[in-house]
Image (cartoon, rainbow, N blue to C red):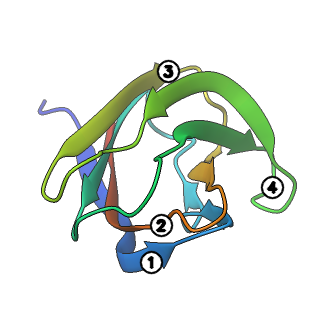
């Protein structure tokens, strides 16, 4: 039997500033996830660290503990690998004044 896997695009060509987050994705069936964040345009200002957040219901969120630096150049990719995440996943970042990034965020899940 082949393993089940899926790629979900949760942010496409979105301009992130201030408090930004991807769309949530229901992933309770998966054992592991790899999240990719690509800078679609040249980022402006200091890029923050992104955080993985989990949720029991897709409404209330808590930090999972994983953090990673967002891409600092156009077409650069950042990634995070996680497991034991419950049912809902999303990526969040808090940008400083004047900082922004246009991103493509994908979640790759495997059973």
Report crowding for label 2: few under 14, some 14 to 19, many 20 or more residues within 10 A (C-alpha).
many
Q: Earlier in the sequence, mark 3 or mark 4?
A: 4
In the rendered image, which residue does mark 3 sit on?
83
x, y percent for residue 78: 29, 38
| Disc 3, SS | strand
Residue 15's label in the rendered image is 1
Q: Earlier in the sequence, mark 2 or mark 3?
A: 3
Q: Which of pointers 2 and 1 indicates the residue nearer the eye?
A: 2
In the rendered image, which residue does mark 2 sit on?
100
Q: Which of pointers 2 and 3 indicates the residue nearer the eye?
A: 2
| Disc 2, SS | loop
Q: Which of pointers 4 and 1 indicates the residue nearer the eye?
A: 1
Q: Does the rendering let one see residue 81?
A: yes
Q: Quadrant of the C terminus?
A: top left
Q: Is residue 42 left or right of residue 33?
A: left
| Disc 1, SS | strand
x, y percent for residue 20: 63, 64
Seen at 65% across and 43% down, the residue is 87
Residue 76's label in the rendered image is none
Instruction: Please say if 24 is above or below 4.
Output: below
């Amino acid at each position: 039997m082949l393993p089940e896997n899926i790629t979900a695009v949760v942010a496409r060509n979105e301009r992130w500033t201030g408090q930004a987050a991807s769309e949530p994705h229901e992933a309770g069936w998966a054992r592991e996830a790899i999240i990719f964040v690509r800078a679609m345009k040249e980022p402006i200002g200091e890029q923050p660290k992104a955080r993985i957040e989990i949720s029991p219901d897709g409404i209330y969120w808590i930090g999972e503990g994983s953090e990673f630096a967002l891409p600092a150049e156009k077409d650069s990719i950042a990634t995070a690998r996680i497991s034991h995440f419950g049912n809902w996943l999303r990526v969040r970042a808090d940008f400083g004044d004047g900082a922004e990034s246009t991103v493509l965020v994908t979640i790759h899940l495997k059973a």
